[in-house]
Image: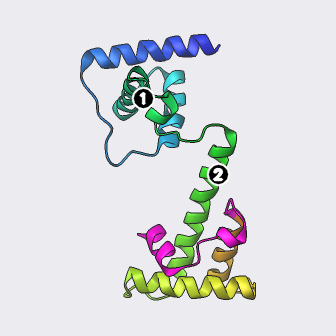
Amino acid sequence: MLIMQADTLHQLLKSRLLSKQYRLTESMQDPLELLSRLRVATQTRVLPDDVAGWLERGIDHLNSGGSLDRGLGLKASGVRAFKNHQAVRMRNFWLTQAAANVAENNISPWRRAGRLSEAIKRHIAFPRSDSMLDQAISEAINHHPGGIEQFPTSQRQLHRLLT
């Protein structure tokens, strides 16, 4: 089955590469999302342009003596890396929800991150779940792949995540 999928992938790439050159678009750079879309492409036999460009870059990196996973932007391989990636995405989703509940809309992203930082530190010290903000923070903490000591609590970390 793996050989059949590799052969199908090779045919898809060959037909795409013969038709025109591709490059990875700036808006679609998440390697795990591209990997997921590649899986769909092997089943549907339709390879999107950005996925083809991503594969081409990986193969070029492999041909130049590098590793395919590095060329594709998959620095860590395996199920654990995928689960961590998904957990971080869910954590960031819940932090975004918490940020939406932390203050009114007319404050700067920096101040919003500061208020969220204070709310997270307060929640870690005295866990509650009586407001939407506290519930979102609880969900973010629950989805965080590391320990609580690694959870982003500083204004700078939160500002980077939210902007």
Residue on which the image places disc 1: 58
In this view of the protein, which residue sits in the foreground, 72 or 133? 72
**Color theme of the render:** rainbow
Whether 151 is among the magenta residues is yes
- Residue 76, position in %: x, y? 59, 41
The residue under the point 45% across, 88% down is: 104
Residue type pointed to by label 1: Gly
Label 1 – label 2 distance at C-alpha: 22 Å
In this rendering, position of residue 147 left or right of residue 116? right
- Extreme left residue here? 20
The residue under the point 45% across, 28% down is: 66
Mark 2 is surrounded, within 10 Å at the Cα level, by few (under 14), some (14 to 19) or many (20 or more) other residues, namely some
- Residue 32, position in %: x, y? 53, 41
The residue under the point 61% across, 37% down is: 77
In this rendering, position of residue 111 left or right of residue 91? left
Q: Quadrant of the C terminus?
A: bottom left
For residue 84, the mark is: 2
Image vertical order of residue 146 relative to residue 5, above or below: below
Residue type pointed to by label 2: Asn
Q: Which residues are magenta?
A: 143-163
For residue 83, the mark is: none
Q: Quadrant of the N terminus?
A: top right
